[in-house]
Image (tube, rainbow, N blue to C red):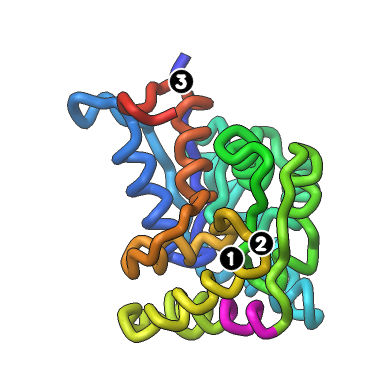
């Protein structure tokens, strides 16, 4: 039986649009009626997740919960969130709502284990996501080796995520900085890169610097399609 999908978005708006675009592109559908009925709440009032985790900023959970309940009231039978840092709050969010929320961190970790057995991932994420250890735990559970960017590298990631993508600034000037970051992590032992912030696939896709990459947004899109009872396009898995 087909399920209705809810997207708890706004964290940020571009990442929300990127997730929905990927869902549409990856669904095996011949016409409009072949796609998932999707309800999107792009709740831009949700406070910054990294700020809440690292510096005592406003708690994002109340607004996340408001959006989730709105999605459910509109008919959503499962929910996905295009924000990796927000998954720190997932256990409490899930406890307070009646429909399942698919866990992007676990989905992406399983993909790493299947695609790159015995290889080492570099976790590219916000300081908040890295501080919570949500990806470290998910990768550990799947037996995946990984490295974490150092403080300087985390600063570069925060610049690219917050000062560039979230700020809707031009991406092209950042190409050499992005390439240098990836090259440095390769020298430290990274075999591939886990795009564990939903702004990073936008940056990576535009700048076209070689990876390889595991796009957590894309893996969440695939999981949502299958969970809702639809098929992936041929060649996807």
Residue 172 position, x and y percent, is 31, 80
Given the current orientation, which residue lies at the most extreme top position? 1
From this view, report whether residue 184 is shown above or below residue 124: below
Q: Principal SS element in the magenta part? A: helix
Comparing 97 with 149, the one in front is 149
Mark count: 3
Q: Secondary structure at mark 3?
A: loop
Mark 1 and 2 residues: CB-CB less than 8 Å, in contact? yes
Q: Return the residue at label 2.
A: 189
From this view, report whether residue 175 is shown above or below residue 65: below
Q: Residue at x 51, y 60 (%)?
A: 198
Label 2 – label 3 distance at C-alpha? 39 Å
Q: Return the residue at label 1.
A: 186
Given the current orientation, which residue lies at the most extreme left position? 31
Mark 3 and 1 residues: CB-CB less than 8 Å, in contact? no
Comparing 64 with 89, the one in front is 89
Residue 102 in view here? no
Residue 164 in view here? yes
Q: Secondary structure at mark 1?
A: helix
Q: Return the residue at label 3.
A: 229
Any magenta on residue 153? Answer: yes
Magenta residues, as a range? 152-158
Mark 2 and 3 residues: CB-CB less than 8 Å, in contact? no
């Amino acid at each position: 039986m087909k399920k209705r999908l809810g997207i708890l978005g706004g964290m940020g708006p571009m990442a929300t649009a990127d997730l929905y675009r990927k869902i549409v592109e990856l669904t095996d559908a011949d016409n409009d009626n072949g796609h998932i009925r999707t309800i999107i709440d792009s709740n831009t009032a949700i406070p910054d997740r990294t700020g809440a985790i690292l510096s005592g900023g406003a708690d994002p959970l109340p607004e996340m919960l408001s959006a989730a309940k709105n999605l459910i009231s509109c008919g959503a039978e499962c929910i996905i969130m295009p924000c990796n840092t927000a998954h720190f709050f997932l256990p409490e969010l899930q406890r307070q709502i009646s429909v399942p929320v698919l866990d992007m961190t676990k989905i992406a970790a399983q993909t790493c284990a299947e695609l790159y057995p015995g290889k080492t991932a570099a976790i590219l994420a916000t300081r908040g996501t890295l501080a919570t250890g949500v990806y470290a735990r998910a990768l550990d559970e799947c037996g995946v080796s990984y490295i974490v960017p150092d403080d300087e590298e985390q600063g570069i990631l925060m610049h690219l995520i917050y000062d560039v993508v979230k700020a809707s600034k031009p991406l092209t000037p950042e190409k050499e900085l992005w390439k240098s970051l990836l090259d440095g992590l390769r020298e430290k032992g990274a075999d591939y890169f886990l795009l564990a912030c939903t702004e990073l696939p936008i940056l990576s896709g535009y700048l076209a610097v070689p990876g390889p990459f595991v796009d957590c947004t894309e893996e969440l899109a695939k999981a949502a399609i299958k969970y809702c009872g639809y098929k992936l396009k041929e060649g996807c898995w």
